[in-house]
């Protein structure tokens, strides 16, 4: 092809047809420019296809992460709901001295329990670390991801205080709580020695008189209620993110 164009140029020059040669030269330049533009266009299409394939792969991996986070959050909310319920029931039991047969359950699954959402953020954290967040084109999804990350990082402001309260409740009941532990939990922990009725009744009496435990419990109960609402809010975030990811993937199929 190059030899063909060279022969045409030489012929035009030989025949001294300068005007035709000039027109030909301009046409040849135009053809070269068009060729370059076509090559660039093809290259851009390939780059866009590669970027879109990478975005789809990231979205799918992120969807897997957030589905797992959704399951974990739901499990946490379920356990947290029990904590709130049992903390309240334990207060009623200690104030009114009724339903004392369940006091051990209320202590171990309520007062001295602590649950926190543990999200799976591997894909998103990797995206942040690589500096390639622009690969996600859905601006609403990007905004939700950033807000979710901030909520997880800074939202548990009461965590240290709540853990301190939980530790305080464990300490205040440490002399007798073991005698109130539910039997199934004792077996799960490898404690096969049975608790006598006398030991259990003595532990119940000591707990009902433990006013310092009750005082801390009231404060912890309020915090646990707030944490439950916060965890429910986290679940909404997760569900919105999953919906955005699924919507984006449908568009790209």
Image (cartoon, rainbow, N blue to C red):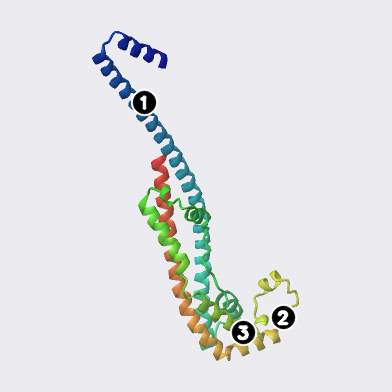
Left or right? Give the position of 203 relative to 68: right
From mark 3 to mark 2, how far is it between C-alphas?
A: 21 Å
Q: Position of residue 129 (x, y in %)?
A: 50, 55
Q: Position of residue 165 (x, y in %)?
A: 54, 81
Mark 1 / mark 3, whichever is N-terminal: 1
Left or right? Give the position of 145 relative to 118: left
- Front residue of this view, candidates 223 and 138: 138
Q: How many marks?
A: 3
Left or right? Give the position of 125 relative to 136: right
Residue 121 lies, with reference to residue 115, above or below; the image says: above
Residue 249 lies, with reference to residue 19, above or below; the image says: below
Residue tagged 2: 195
From mark 1 to mark 3, how far is it between C-alphas?
A: 80 Å
From mark 1 to mark 2, how far is it between C-alphas?
A: 89 Å
Residue tagged 3: 171
Asked whether disc 1 touches disc 3, contact meaning CB atoms under 8 Å apart, the reply is no
Q: Position of residue 58 (x, y in %)?
A: 48, 47
Indicate the secondary structure of the residue bearing disc 1: helix
Residue 35 image label: 1
């Amino acid at each position: 092809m190059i030899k063909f164009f060279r022969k045409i140029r030489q012929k035009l020059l030989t025949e001294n047809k300068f005007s035709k040669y000039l027109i030909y030269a301009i046409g040849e330049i135009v053809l070269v420019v068009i060729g370059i533009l076509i090559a660039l266009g093809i290259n851009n299409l390939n780059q866009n296809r590669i970027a879109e394939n990478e975005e789809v792969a990231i979205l799918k991996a992120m969807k897997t992460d957030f589905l797992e986070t959704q399951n974990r959050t739901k499990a946490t909310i379920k356990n947290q709901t029990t904590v709130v319920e049992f903390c309240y029931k334990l207060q009623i039991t200690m104030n009114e001295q009724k339903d004392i047969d369940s006091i051990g359950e209320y202590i171990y699954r309520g007062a001295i329990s602590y649950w926190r959402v543990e999200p799976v953020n591997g894909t998103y954290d990797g995206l942040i670390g690589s500096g390639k967040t622009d690969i996600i084109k859905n601006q609403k999804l990007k905004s939700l991801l950033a807000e979710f990350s901030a909520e997880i990082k800074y939202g548990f402001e009461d965590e240290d205080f709540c853990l301190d309260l939980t530790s305080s409740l464990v300490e205040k009941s440490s002399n007798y709580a073991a005698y109130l532990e539910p039997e199934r939990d004792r077996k799960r922990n490898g404690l096969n020695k049975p608790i006598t009725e006398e030991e259990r009744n003595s532990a119940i009496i000591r707990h009902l008189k433990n006013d310092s435990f009750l005082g801390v419990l009231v404060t912890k109960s309020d915090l646990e209620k707030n944490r439950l609402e916060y965890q429910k809010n986290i679940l909404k975030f997760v569900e919105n993110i999953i919906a955005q990811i699924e919507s984006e993937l449908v568009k790209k199929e």
